[in-house]
Amino acid sequence: MKNQVEEFNEYRQKMNDKILGDNNKIIKRIFNLDTNAFSAGALDVKTKELLGLVASTVLRCDDCVKYHLETSYKEGISKEEVMEALSIATLVGGTIVIPHLRRAYEYWETLETYKD
């Protein structure tokens, strides 16, 4: 049985392939910009992922939160660092983001037990 990490990644990849397969120049450039924005630069990847996680939580984008959580996990970011970032997101976003905080916490737990 697939877990939510596998389901999320398979769906994301399938839909990205379809979207990019339509060869829309603007969408391709947006995807490229997103990829490059999170590459190491003046800020390291870890910092950028935590910034992305905070912004995604405040904007209440669960798919984005999952993406940044998984990338953060792969980058070796600790649970404590993630929770501190999510606490800032909850402070900035207000109580309306608490449901997203719950799902983020649950997804992080799944990442901790997930085996590739």
Image: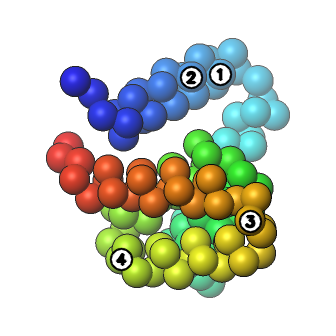
Which residue is labeled 4 in the image?
Answer: 78
Foreground pick, 46 / 5: 5
How far apart, in angstroms, are the residues tagged by discs 3 and 2?
A: 31 Å
What residue is pinned by disc 1? 19
Label 2 near label 1: C-beta < 8 Å? yes
Q: Residue at x 36, y 40 (%)?
A: 5
Front tag of 3 and 1: 3
Marker count (numbered): 4
Whether the residues at callouts 3 and 2 have beta carbons within 8 Å, the answer is: no
Q: Quadrant of the C terminus?
A: top left
Residue 52 location, x and y as percent? 63, 64
Secondary-structure class at tag 4: loop
**Label 1, label 2: how many angstroms apart (C-alpha)?**
6 Å
Q: Earlier in the sequence, mark 2 or mark 4?
A: 2
Q: Mark 1 or mark 4, which has the lower sequence index?
A: 1
The answer to whether residue 40 of the structure is visible from this angle is no
Amino acid type, label 2 = Met
Q: How far is mark 2 from mark 4, CA to CA?
A: 30 Å
Q: Return the disc, 3 or 1, that comes first in the chain's sequence.
A: 1
Neighbor class of circle 3 (other Cα within 10 Å; few <14, some 14-19, many 20+) is few
Instruction: Calculate the distance from the C-alpha at mark 3 to the C-alpha at mark 4.
Output: 24 Å
Q: Which residue is mark 2?
A: 15
Left or right: 100 as drawn, with respect to 109 = right
Name the mark nearer the viewer: 2 or 4.
4
Query: Which element is circle 3 on?
Result: helix
Instruction: Check disc 1 and give the amino acid type.
Output: Ile
Please, what secondary structure does the residue beneath circle 2 have?
Answer: helix
- Mark 2 and mark 4 residues within 8 Å of each other at the beta carbon: no
- Residue type beneath disc 3: Thr
Q: Earlier in the sequence, mark 3 or mark 4?
A: 4
Give the residue pinned by disc 3.
95
Q: What's under tag 4, amino acid-wise? A: Ser
